[in-house]
Image (spheres, helix red, strand yellow):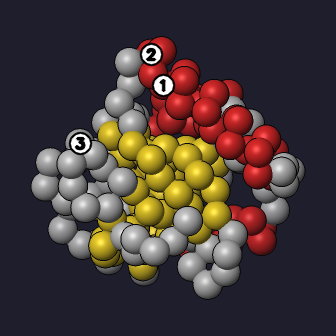
Amino acid sequence: MATDDDWSAYGRAVIDIAPPGRAGLRLVPDREGVTDTWPDGLAAPVVVVTAWNPDSVVLPAADNRARNRRLVAELDRRGVGHWPAVGRDPVGRYFEEGVAVPGMGETEGVAFGARHGQAAIYVWTPDALAVVSCTLERRLTVGWRCVPSPTDED
């Protein structure tokens, strides 16, 4: 189960997204109510979900990558478009691979995250970046800025 420290980390995480055919972007949390201009051509909302470290239990990288492949395979079987995404600690080396799913609604995203053992998902809209619990009635809403994604990381 996610702790208060986990929730603080979720709210600080940056998210690198690699939409096909365009430069990667990094979502950077900001003060609530502060947002950049929504990127052209992206369907809102964008749900970001991972299958790493279910129930906040840290697994070996190989296990996490296998879980992520199963998540991607499920989306592919359902014909749901998705892009690679990586959530990162902005000052440390911690990261989790996942996917960004354009046009997926929050309710469907929460159900999808819960099926993959996740404490929470991200829901990115033109107005906010929200961390939404998959198991509790909990939500953390922040603003966001969009900057180019660095190319020299993982």
Residue linked to disc 3: 43
Sequence-first tag of 1 and 3: 3
* Amino acid at pointer 1: Leu
Name which residue lies at 33% across and 40% down.
102
* Amino acid at pointer 3: Ala
Q: Is label 2 or label 3 in front?
A: 2
Quadrant the C terminus occupies: bottom right
Tell me whether circle 1 and circle 2 mark residues in contact (CB < 8 Å): yes
Name which residue lies at 40% across and 74% down.
150
Would you call the spot at circle 3 few (<14 residues within 10 Å), some (14-19), or many (20 or more)?
few
- Side of 28 where 35 appears, left or right: left
Sequence-first tag of 2 and 3: 3
Name which residue lies at 64% across and 56% down.
96
Viewer-nearest residue: 134 or 152: 152
The residue tagged with tag 1: helix, strand or loop? Answer: helix
- Side of 19 where 87 appears, left or right: right
Q: Distance between the residues labelled 2 and 3?
A: 18 Å
Residue 9 appearing in the image: yes
Determine whether 57 is above or below 102 in the image: below
Tell me whether circle 1 and circle 3 mark residues in contact (CB < 8 Å): no
- Side of 108 where 43 appears, left or right: left
Residue linked to disc 2: 78
Would you call the spot at circle 2 few (<14 residues within 10 Å), some (14-19), or many (20 or more)?
few
Residue linked to disc 1: 75
